[in-house]
Image (cartoon, coloured by chain):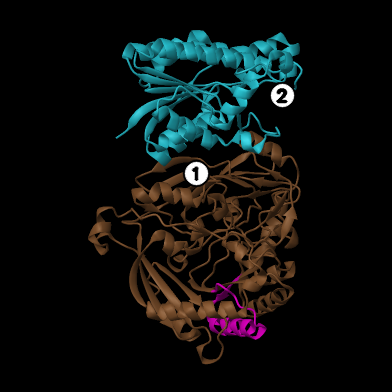
Chain colours: A cyan, B brown
Amino acid sequence: MTAQPVLIIGARSDIAMALARRYAAAGHDLQLAARRSEGLAADAADLALRHGVKASVHELDILDAASFGPFLDSLPVLPATAICVVGVLGEQAVSEADPAAATLVIRSNYEGPALLTGLIANRFAERGSGTIIGISSVAGDRGRASNYVYGSAKAGYTAFLSGLRNRLSKRGVHVMTVLPGFVRTRMTAGMDLPLRLTAEPDAVAEGIYQAAAKRRDVIYVKPIWRLVMTVIRAIPERIFKGTSL
Amino acid sequence: MMIEGWGRFPRQLCRVHAPRDEAALRMALAEGPRIARGNGRGYGDCAMQRNATIDMRAFRRMLAFEEENGQLVVEAGVLLADVIATFLPRGWFPPVTPGTKFVTIGGMVAADVHGKNHHRDGTFGRFVDWLDLMTEDGTVLRCSPQENAELFAWTIGGMGLTGIILRVAFRLRRVESAWIRQTTLPARDLGEVMALFEANEAATYSVAWIDCLTTGAAMGRSALMLGEHATTDELSRVRRSAPFHVPRKPVRKVPVDLPQVALNRMTVRAFNALYHRNARAGAGTSVVDWDSYFYPLDAILEWNRIYGARGFMQFQCVLPTGAAKEGLTALLQAIAASGQGSFLSVLKRMGGEAGGMSFPREGYTLALDFPFSERSASLMDRLDAITLDHGGRFYLAKDARMAAATLRRSDPRAGAFAAMRRECALGLFRSSQSERLCL
């Protein structure tokens, strides 16, 4: 039996590929969408060969909202689960100085994912079923000097997903927000990450897969992050503004 | 970072690149002298280069499979273990496999590995239809017996010295089950095991564990193990209902480096005595699963740590048939006289020679390992000399210490290979091994 197809948006990232492997291992067909998607053909072939599933590749530019409708129409079938893994970290210093760079970070992390997720949600609501998984970030839980442009866009996406979940909870559509902490990927390559707070992409994928099966609402992949962010959110602003976290 | 081969000797500080795509790989090539590295199962220094060692394991995608002829196309960093896990349940098995499944396909081509079926089927290279090779300036050449044929031939068994192997198309073979019908035949001495090899030329798989410590009349006593892929009607009813299903076994791991004293003449002798007693007691036919049959040592992860932190050295030579009996006798006598026990000693009949620098040739191959020490180093020099005297040659995937002159004397192809590398300007593909051997 082939389980329900899964759409992965932003499929070229390490977390996305780990998710693709995890869902394919469970027998799900895959729809892999990304910019410069020709590079994904080999990954699709690999997933199909190893797991005996169907895997298709779709071109998608997350900054081109006008293309979202035709993109969804072009999928072989409306997926059962859609996962948005799109994210651009950018460089905080550059984002502060250059509005064009900040715009790219804000649009890539908030505008694009929110608009596309919203369109998919409408189609799922019409069908009366579906799971939407949005990968946001702990950086959205509180703005910090070191990455607030990225963080504020993720905060927007977290709020968007929360609202969507609220709206669709009685329409058979489940929305799950994922707030990964540090993950060892190309995005974080070269950073000095604290070991206890850092997850491997495959562990993130496993956590998401398990949580989605249990229809959880908001997950921190490593549970310790829930504690860390609770503490960080609880610090009074008067004190917080003087810290360098 | 410090890297080492499976034998853990030598250990070298190398700059390691781990490119994720061809563009990044091209950038790594620009660094100067470089060698590709797979899963690090070569024993010595064949996959290290201080200037730029290129870890190919990110190239791990399977690209295409044709059900009609069993042709599988993979990126070079795909592990043999993954190929088996994916295709054995569908009735396909590698045409040739070395003694571990934790090798990359690129590494299998570079070392032109052989298995227990060499006498019948030849090396892995025989089943390669084509490969894509990134050469000196980053261009990618499709190489096959029809296209860039000379480069193709030198790449198989070429130890990565002709370029970076990117993709490989090779043929799997059909099997009916995941089980092997194994027949064990005890042999009292060297003459008997050789006669048994000759008498069982028709067997698909054959290999002998040989006792390297016993001298006198029983010198060379062995256990010859023959194997055939079991057909479904050779399986019990339960297994026949799911012929590719093998119950999972626990995987053990050597947790720490054992002190070198743990492996000494006494323990090796005890192990060999026990093994041969078991072989006599267990002589006859049994059905065993593929993993236990082909990869008994893979069940103990990091088994190389039993030799301690100083590591060990492998010795593997092949002697031509005519000189084999005399040469093997001389080798066994030298080992026994040295008092150095080889924990695992494997004897195997080999079939004909392939092209390029491919190791196997018609005759007998003997593989030994010794914990690293000055004494075993001098023993190995003795074994080199005996091999040369009997017209034999050495397996580069195992070598960590041979002298350049020894290689030249043992294998006239080495000179031609070095000349070809100069002519085709492939000199920047070089490993610590190729520098040592002046290839």
Q: Which residues are magenta?
A: B316-345
Q: Residues under labels 1 and 2: Cα distance? A: 45 Å
Q: Nearer the viewer, mark 1 or mark 2?
A: 2
* In-front residue for pair B423/B251: B251
Tell me the SS state at disc 2.
Answer: loop
Q: Position of residue A105 (x, y in %)?
A: 64, 15
Name the quarter where the C terminus of chain A is drawn: top right
Left or right? Give the position of A215 relative to B372.
left
Residue at 51 percent across and 9 percent down: it is A65
Q: Magenta stretch: dominant SS? A: helix
Q: Which residue is mark 2?
A: A245
Question: Badge 2 sits on which subunit?
Answer: A
- B339 falls in the magenta region: yes
Amino acid under disc 2:
Leu
Residue at the bottom extreme?
A: B217
In x, y percent, where is residue B110?
59, 54
Q: Chain of mark 1?
A: B
Residue A4 makes an appearance in the image: yes
Name which residue type carries label 1.
Val
**Residue drawn at the location 50% of the way across and 84% of the way down:** B190
Instruction: Confirm whether the magenta stretch covers residue B19.
Output: no
Name the residue rendered at 63%, 24% in the picture.
A231
- In the rendered structure, find residue B74 and report the number of the disc placed on it: 1
